[in-house]
Image (cartoon, rainbow, N blue to C red):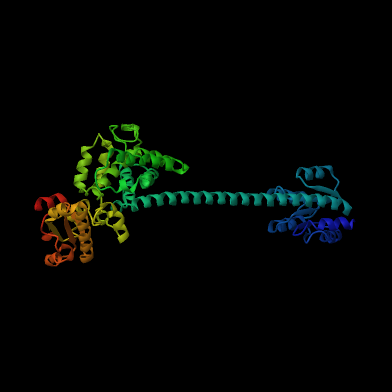
Amino acid sequence: MNEAQIKSIKAKTKNFSILYVEDEKELRESSSKFLRKIFPYVDIADNGQEGLEKYLQNSYDIVITDILMPKMNGLELIRYIREKNKKQEIIVISANTDAENLTKAIQLEVTGYVIKPINFDQILRILEQSIDKIVVFRENKMYSTQLESMVEERTRTVLELQNQLVENYEQTIYSLVEMIEERDTYTGGHSKRVASYSRDIAKEIGMSQEECQLIYQAGILHDVGKITTPDSILLKPGKLTQQECSLVQAHVLTGYKILSKVPMYHELAKIVHAHHEHYDGSGYPNGIKGEEIPFYSRIMMIADAFDAMTTCRIYKTKKSVGDAIEELNELSGTWFDPQILKSAIKVFKEVNFDEILKQEPHSYIDEERFTYFFKDTLTNVYNQYYLNFILQRNADKKSFSCLNILYLRNFTSFNNKYGWRGGDKFLYDFAAYLQKEFSDFRIFRIFGDDFVLLSKTYQTLDVEKINNFDLFKDSGIYCEFKYYDLSTDNINNYEELQEKNY
C-alpha cells in the first residue's frame, strides 16, 4: 500500500463515515483495519440484513458491500439503499465473477466493483474517486447554501434599504405637510381630515381597502405644494389679488412636481394634481371636466371643500354641517360629481366635530405666528381684521366675556395742530401704555383712533386713571369708554360692533 497516498486521502476524509458489509470474518477484520487508516468512522455489518438495519438508522458517506451473503445479499441491500438515496456512494467487493451480478451492480450505479482477493491499492483508487466526488459535492452544496444565504442576505439588505428609502421619503414629505400646517394654526390638521373624509367617502362608495388607503395617502399629501406659498399670502386676512390667487393655485403643480419625482408617489401625484378641478371644467390647473378628472380627485375635492367650509380660516369663520351640506348641494353638477356627492353627504352627516372645534393656538409662539399679519403696523397692537375673527369665533366658543371700547376724543384737533407725524407718535405711545397697563387684555386699534380691550373675565377700566396719564397733559385729548358684556350683548363680528357705536 502507498502510505503517502493514504495520508493524502485521509486529509480529505475528516468527519467521513463508512459502512462495510462482509460475511467473511477474516476478510472483514483485515479490510476494516485498512479502512480505519483512512476514515475516522467505520461501521461493520456481518450480512446484508444487518447492514440495511444500520444504514436505516445512520448516515454514511460510503457503503462497501459483498454480493454473496446470508439473510440478504449485496444486490438486495443496494436496491434498498437506492430507494432511500439514489446518490449514495457504493463500492462492491466480491469473489463472484458472474457477469449477470456484475451487470446488475452496474445497473444499480455502483461506483466500483472489486474482485476478491482484495487488492488494497485498487480499493484505494476507487475510494479516492468516491471521496473526491463527495468532497466536490459537499463544496458545491456548501457553496450553493452559502450562495443562497448570500442571495437571501443581499435581498434582505436591498429590501431593508428600499424600506428605509420609503420611510425617508414619507418622513420628509410628511414633515413638509406638518411645516405647512404649522404656519396656520387654525387650519392645523386639515390634511389629515381631508384624508379621513376621502377614505370614508371611498368606503361608502364601496371601494376596496387598498383603494381607500391610496386616497387616504393622497389626502395627507394633497397640499404639500403650499410649501412654496408665501406666508404673506397664505396668512393674509383680507381678499387676495388676482396675482396672489395665481400663486396659491400654483400649489397643485408644485405638489405634483414634488410627488412625481418619487416613484412610489406617481399615482398620488396624479390625484393631487387634479384635486382643484371642477366637474363643469371651471377649476384649475387644466380646466378638465367630468370623467376627465381622476375618480380619486373627484372624491378629494369634495372632502377638501367640506373641511374648508366647516373650519375657521384666517379670512372667514366656519359653517355648520347643515350649511356646508347645503352649499355642497348647490354646487352639485358644477363643481362636484353628483353621484360621489350623494355618498359624501352620508359621510358628512356622521362627522364628529369635537376635535375640530378645538383649533386654537397651543402656545405663545403659535399665537404670534398666527397674528403676525393681524398686527397694526403703527401701534403694534392687533387690527380690526383680527378683532372680527375673534368676535366670529367667540360667537361659538364664548372665550371672551368682556369688551371695552376706549374713544380718543379731540384727536382730530390734535392731528390738525401737530400734523400726522405728531398724531402717529401719540397713538404709538398710547398703545404702548395700554399694553403695559392692561397686559391681561387683548388690545385692538379700530376706526383709526379708538381701541378695543377684550378680556376673558369681567374687568372694567378706570378711565379717570387713564386720563391722568402724562401723555394726555396739555394735549386736549381725553378718553371715554363703553363696556359690553359679550355673554348677553349680541356682537358676533366687527360690523355689528360698528353699528352699535357709529
Considering every residue shown, the one lying at the far front of the view is: 417
Up the image or down, 246 lies above or below 315; here it is: above
Q: Residue at x 44, y 40 (%)?
A: 260
* Position of residue 477 in the picture relative to residue 211 (left or right): left
Relative image position of residue 463 (x, y in whole percent): 12, 65
Q: Between residues 385 and 213, which one lies in front from this camera angle?
A: 385
- Identify which residue, 150 or 393, lies in the foreground: 393
Q: Is residue 47 visible?
A: yes
Q: Quadrant of residue 283?
A: top left
Considering depth in this image, is 436 or 401 the residue closer to the camera?
Answer: 436
Q: Position of residue 38 (x, y in %)?
A: 82, 59
Residue 403: x and y, percent?
Answer: 15, 59
- The x, y position of residue 24, in whole percent, is 84, 58
Q: How many marks?
A: 0
Tell whether 73 sits left or right of 276.
Answer: right
Residue 256's place in the image compared with 485, above or below, is above
Image quarter of residue 49: bottom right
Instruction: Kindly indicate the quadrant of the structure image that contains residue 59.
Output: bottom right
Q: Is residue 491 among what the camera can see?
A: no
For the N terminus, which image quadrant?
bottom right
* Front-lying residue, 275 or 149: 275
| Left or right, residue 424 beside residue 301 | left
